[in-house]
Amino acid sequence: MAKKTKSTEFSGYLLTLPGEEREAVSAFFKVLDRHLRIGREWKRQLVRDFEAAILWYAKNGVPLDEALRRLSPTKLGGFYSRPADDWFPLDAAAKVYPLSMSHKQMAVFRLSAYLDRDVAPELLQMALTFTIKRFPFFATTIKNGVFWHYIDAAKRRFPVEPESTVPCADINVSLTGSKSFRVLYFKNRVSCEFFHILTDGTGGMIFLKTLTAEYLRLLGESVPAERGVLDIDGLPDAAESADDFSKCVSGRKSSGFVDKPAIQMGGKLSSVKPCQVIHFDMDAGALRAAARARGASVTALVTAMMFICCKAATDRQHGTVHIQVPVNMRNYFESKTLRNFSLYANIRLALEDIGPLDGILPEVSRQLRDGVAFDKMQEMMNGAVKLVRSVRLVPLFIKCPVARVIYGFLGDRAFTTTLSNLGVVDLPEGMAEHIKKMDFVLGTVALARAACSMVTVNGVATLSVAKLTTDPSFEERMYALLRDLGLEVKVSGSELYGF
């Protein structure tokens, strides 16, 4: 017999209910109908989502009245009852970032939460449907304009999907209606992948935390809207979608972005990006203690180790290793924005100067300290806005290749690798005990054979390495260095793709 569709299965379920409960379900869907004034196909799919969630509750012993309470259509607000009538111009960083990429393919980054139980896709879908209205800037599609990319509001079903491809796969913005983010699940992992011109790590983490909190509530947990978890029933704050770059530009000088080519690690480039993702989990307190014992921050310590790993992963004898370290500008300016509000510091060492860890750590710490100084960040912010203004009237199809030639910092040749550290994630009560760990993965670019990122939660620091080559030199040296610090390291990761 053919497998029943959700609609047929739900109809059969209704027949098992007593009359009073069938009437309650009927009334529930009448209220839902008033909240769904969108296209017929989107509406049909959303109704199916509600049916699937009710069936999940029934199969897992949740009383019908409690299931209907958790899934109340009033949690949709008026989001799906009003047509989309807004669009968002990109902020300065978001305009600059895509110019260096293919006009059709844009990089993404991933944030993941590992729960204490396997994901129920039916409830994760409902959590996303209820959460998205609180993030109107995320309920969008990416469009190509004449002069810039822009983000157009979309009233549609945003699906959760099982993982079926490599982490951080490109988003093709040449397709009509391309989504600006993805929500994926695998076993006990919930992952959000974001188009990098939509948001940065801070904004993405707020979205993931808010989504995961609502998912846990649908499971019956009590999670307050605090510590970076937004109230999904609250009204969006205009400051959350503001372009804070334009507000923070001063009349001071701007720093240039052109840079000399950096050493690239060796190893054959993969046709699949990334071809592997490797995670190093370690005790956050022990890592912090190792850094403090050397008079350094965790970011400086890991950056210094990356220089040693880069040297181990190349046959070159001369040249400069250049590591970019993204900097959260919310540390300098008061901001509520969930959009991009990050720049970066540049740390450089000549290959011949890269020696033992304790020998290079003071210089790496100094460069990092100087690079993130307020004046330096202000100059770079001024430069980013100046760049945008200088090419604002150039058509997009001309702007991209011209910008790649004029502004060398946009090219992959200008840096060897990247380290992005989101720091310690604070979780509210009712949520922390259900999240085992998190990880943060940067999408790879054209030439950098490895990109590193870090996040810490519940005492677990996770360093992730996204690979663009099968050469294991970088990660093997990193593991050895972490062990030399006296750290217990748990290694996990994906299989190799594309070979």
Image: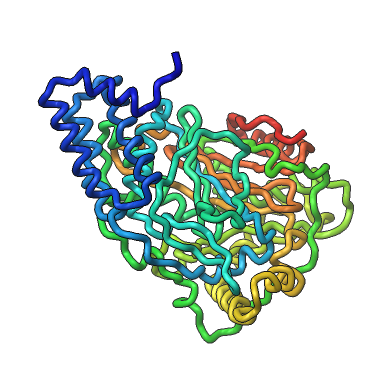
Q: Which residue is drawn at 40% across and 34% down?
A: 435
Quarter of the image for residue 462 reads: top right
Q: Is residue 293 at least partly visible in the picture?
A: no
- Residue 380: % across, % down: 60, 73
Residue 221 falls left or right of residue 240: left
Quadrant location of the N terminus in the rendered image: top left
- Residue 186: % across, % down: 50, 31
**Residue extending farthest bottom:** 251
Residue 423 falls left or right of residue 78: right
Q: Residue at x 29, y 35 (%)?
A: 218
Residue 396 falls left or right of residue 227: right
Q: Which residue is drawn at 28% across and 20% down?
A: 12
Q: Is residue 188 at least partly visible in the picture?
A: yes
Q: In this view, does 228 lie above or below 89?
A: above
Camera-side residue: 407 or 438? Answer: 407
Q: In this view, does 243 lie above or below 34?
A: below
Quarter of the image for residue 6 reads: top left
Q: Residue at x 74, y 74 (%)?
A: 406
**Residue extending farthest top:** 1
